[in-house]
Amino acid sequence: MDKNADIRYNFCEGGVHMEIYDGNIRDTTNFDTDRFLKINGCGYQNRAKDSAVIRKKGRVDYHLVLVAKGKLEVMYHGEMFCLGKGGVFIYEPGDEHYYRAMTASSTFWIHFAGTAVSDIFSDMDITAGVYESDVGAAATDEFRILVRRNGSTNERKLSLGTLLNLLALISDGVHKSRHSEKRGEVKNIDSILEYMNMNYEKKLTVTTLAEMSGYSVSRFLHLFSDMIGKPPMRYLRDIRLENACELLDTSEYPVSEVASLCGFDDPLYFSRVFADKYGISPSGYRKRTQRLTDK
């Protein structure tokens, strides 16, 4: 027996079909990675509820699956995902494979390889991973064409073109999803900015703002800093200082009262950060403004 052959165990566990690939080797079915681009196999499969595919060592080529119907549980780099119709996942060579049908499901799958794959992915701005968005009916149509041509030697070149079209459609679906997600993120951060500008005098914390945004603290900090160019607490401090300048210009409140009205509990801290930002103390700023007004 060829030591590189695919060793697969098919059995039923409680009436459920399982495919367990030997954990000590990779699945090398139709192995070919030296060509520019090659389809090593593709197909369409109906999957009973709880049927699973497990490849501990993965494959030597790329493995792409499109959920045509039902729901799949997919593990990618140790993280679990739930994919519905239109969801896509791509395993790189050597990635551990695990996916299980959560309901009666149908999937399209394709194995491909070649020296051009990394450049194609780079040009299309896609990577291996899990894409939960619906890539649309067009991608399903391309998969049907691939499956129909799979056994035809005369149509292999056409099949490579279809594979590129398929990847382009997936890329387009992924980018649309990213833009939609980005718009939602911008909207969420905009609402937080509005709240901060209207409530700067209140005791606000990163945790509170993150909870309001619906993100984890780390995700909120990343999004806010990326969109605004500074962390939320620094932004809040700057809002408070700008409003303090306004009160120093237009009111006769003592400096300590100005600090309190602008959300600073400690007048000494207020004076220090004010001087750090403007190069002058709050009282000095007020005197300078008054002199300019009197002239």
Image (cartoon, rainbow, N blue to C red):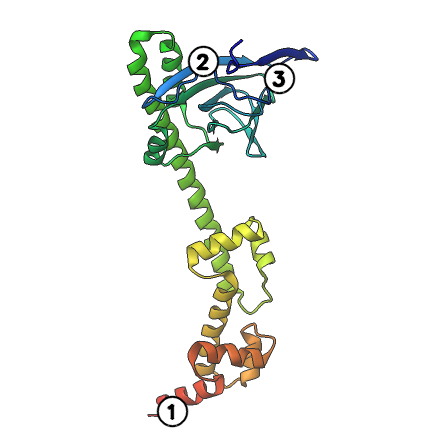
Figure check: 66 above or below 204 = above
Measuring from the top left, give residue 273's x and y in whole percent. 51, 76
Cα distance between the residues tagged 1 and 3: 80 Å
| Residue 142 location, quadrant | top left
Q: Is residue 33 left or right of residue 80?
A: left
Q: Closer to the camera, 13 or 10?
A: 10
Q: Which is nearer the N-term, disc 2 or disc 1?
A: 2
Does dot 1 land on a helix, a strand or a loop?
Answer: helix
Q: How many numbered circles are shown? A: 3
Reading the image, the residue beneath label 1 is 291
Disc 3 target residue: 49
Residue 230 appears in which quarter of the rendering? bottom left
Q: For the point 42% across and 39% down, which residue is it? A: 178
* Residue 165 percent location from the top left of the image: 32, 24
Residue 198 - label:
none
> Looking at the picture, which amino acid does disc 2 mark?
Gly
As displayed, is residue 15 above or below residue 237? above
Q: Residue at x 55, y 70 (%)?
A: 201
Q: Are marks 3 and 2 in contact (CB under 8 Å)?
A: no
Nearer mark to the viewer, of 1 and 3: 3
Q: Nearer the viewer, mark 2 or mark 1?
A: 2
What residue sits right under mark 2 in the picture? 43
Estimate the x, y position of residue 136 in percent, counting from the top left. 41, 25
User: In the depicted view, which residue is nearer to us: 178 or 152?
Assistant: 152
* CB-based contact (under 8 Å), mark 1 and mark 3: no
Secondary element type, mark 3: loop
Does 60 sit above or below residue 179? Answer: above
Residue at image location 42% in from the left, 36% down from the top: 177
Going by the numbered disc 1, the residue's amino acid type is: Arg
Q: Quadrant of the N terminus?
A: top right
